Amino acid sequence: MAPRVQRVGVTMDPELFDRFKQRCEAEGKRSASSQISELVKAYLGNPDVSALEQIFNLKVEIEQIQRRLTTISRLENGEARTTCLEKAVEKLEERVKSLEKCKLSFKKHDAQDARISALEKKYAALAGKTARLEAEENARILKLKD
């Protein structure tokens, strides 16, 4: 008689267990139903285990598989959310850069507006001075004519 492998409180046919283990490793992610059907075949193939023990052990294995699948699903959802958030952050960073460029452009325009205002004030002052000088010049000319 072949030696038995102890697993979760139950002895299992080593050949069935090895095939199950190799298949799990080869397939990586597997659906719960295919893992459960393999476990059922492995446990039912062992005549030393009572039906109640088989059912209990299958329930334990099914719960473990479901927990692993839930964990994998949560991790995948978390990765998807993280990726979406990273993309959103990248878009926001690009928008901030664009706004900073606009801000610099506005600063340049504001500086130009300030220079234009200063030049307009100088022009107005010079225009006023020119008008006064012209008036004085006209007054002198009129005095000389008299």
Image (cartoon, rainbow, N blue to C red):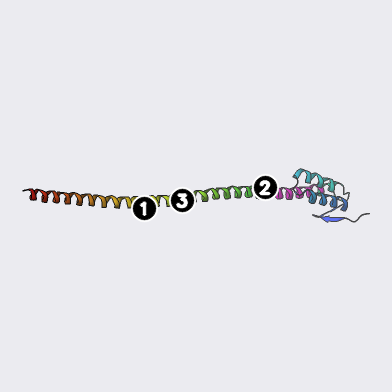
Residue 143 colored in magenta in the image: no
Q: How many marks?
A: 3
Using the numbered discs, state the Cα–Cα distance from disc 1 to disc 2 in whole angstroms: 56 Å
Amino acid type, mark 2: Ser
Taking the image as shown, residue 70 lies to the left or right of residue 6, namely: left
Q: Nearer the viewer, mark 1 or mark 3?
A: 1
Q: How far across and how far down the image is residue 59, in percent?
A: 76, 47
Disc 2 residue crowd, few under 14, some 14–19, many 20+, Cα 10 Å:
few
- Region in magenta: 54-69
Using the numbered discs, state the Cα–Cα distance from disc 3 to disc 2 in whole angstroms: 42 Å
The foreground one among 64 and 103 is 103
| Residue underneath mark 3 | 101
Taking the image as shown, residue 103 lies to the left or right of residue 52, namely: left
- Which residue sits at x=50%, y=48%? 95
**Disc 1 + disc 2, Cβ < 8 Å:** no
- Which residue sits at x=48%, y=49%? 98
Taking the image as shown, residue 48 lies to the left or right of residue 69, namely: right
Prevailing SS of the magenta stretch = helix
| Residue underneath mark 2 | 73
The foreground one among 72 and 47 is 72
Element assignment for label 2: helix
For marks 3 and 2 on the same chain, the one whose residue lies earlier in the sequence: 2
The foreground one among 96 and 23 is 96
**Disc 3 + disc 2, Cβ < 8 Å:** no
Taking the image as shown, residue 91 lies to the left or right of residue 56, namely: left
Q: How far across and how far down the image is residue 18, in percent?
A: 85, 52
